Amino acid sequence: MAVPFLDLKAIYNEIRTEVTPEINDVLESCGYVLGPKVAAFEEKFALITGSRYCIAVSNGTAALHCMLSASGLEPGSGVIVPPNTFTATVEGIILAGMVPVFVDTEDRTWNLDPVLVEAFCEKNRTPRGVVDPRTGAVVRAVMAVDLYGHPADHTRLESIAGANRMMLFEDAAQSHDANRDGSPAGSFGMAASFSFYPGKNMGAFGEGGAVTTDDKELNDKARSLRDHGSRDKYYYEYIGHNYRMCAIQGAVLGVKARHIHRWNDQRREAASRYEQLLKGLPLQLPEEAPSTRHVFHLYAVHTPRRDALRDFIALRGIASGMHYPHPLHLQKAYAYLGHAPGDFPVSERNSLENLTLPMFPGITPAQQLEVADAITAFFRE
């Protein structure tokens, strides 16, 4: 039996009768950009994230750029960020006129390691503040990524950031409806960014993104920046962008907001089944920190034999992924930062060894057994 990596059609079929009239409302109104459907979604998502404000934008990269641009950080500021993430995380930093400062991750959750962040700050503290020795940038912010759907240790990172006069930001693109230490993903630090790319836990029928925050000034500026720097039509306070959300995506996401918690419960149940099916094999399985709701955007296992395992299960019709096979500090686009292999060993091991298995709401026990049987057969052979 072939097993897909994810099944977007099944999710669509589940909400078809709910989402069709919502989309038809947009089509009948001919109001295709922003509007009441987007505003209603913003209210719903603010509640999900425990935030005062939600600013819907056109995609996740726009959310990162808009969030940092609206933050009040000085141009040229350094932003601590992990290297094992999608390039959009760092693109947002650079587009906002800031400097990425890579710090390695912990090998249990693959999230930014607070111990290493604190050590970096102590080692590079100067009278001007914490200064990145490679670029000379004064580090004024930390941005952690909730990789694979597991929230980073934002509570500890916020303490470290505060002690060093830095802001904390959250890239929550993979952690819709996740929770840590009693707080939802999207509620930590100064602000958080989300992506609603179709394959996310709460995906649009196209592109979409959002910024969540409790800060009124950041909210007001981000709303202006997403609409060409304007609060009133044809009057411009800033050089902005066209980062407005399409009304159809607002309609779709407003429906999906009703289902996200239940869908994530199904992902968590599937993760528990994988854990039982795969225990005892020479694989590093995902872990969940105490007081955490991991939402398993991706179910990532790790093995030094990743490539051979992937090829083997593909012959049996099992789809899989690699997130992410090349850490950012070793990518050509970021070569100017001067990093070399070995600089961030945990992130590099993640890139060499991670394999993401089929994971989606509604994945059946039979499908998961097929995946587990194929993996077991590989290690037996």
Image (cartoon, rainbow, N blue to C red):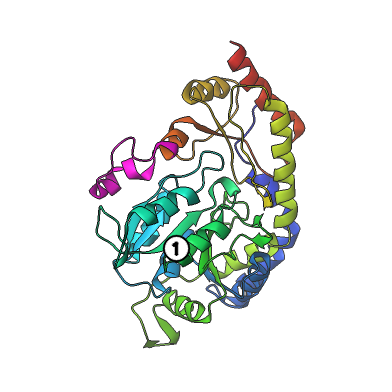
Compared with 190, 184 (above or below) is above
327 in magenta: yes
Q: Which residues are magenta?
A: 326-346
| Residue 273: image location, x then y, percent | 74, 34
Q: Amino acid at mark 1?
A: Leu
- Which residue occupies 42% across, 76% down? 225
Which image quadrant for residue 176?
Answer: bottom right
333 in magenta: yes
Compared with 3, 163 (above or below) is below
Q: Is residue 373 left or right of residue 231?
A: right
Which image quadrant for residue 347?
Answer: top left
Which image quadrant for residue 367?
Answer: top right
Residue at the disc numbered 1 = 64
Q: Is residue 355 visible?
A: yes
- Which residue occupies 64% across, 39% down? 359
State the count of labels.
Answer: 1
Depth check: 170 or 322 in front? 170
Depth check: 39 or 110 in front? 110
The quadrant in which the C terminus is found is top right
Compared with 143, 332 (above or below) is above
Residue furthest to the top: 381
- Which residue occupies 60% across, 66% down? 187
Q: Is residue 112 visible?
A: no
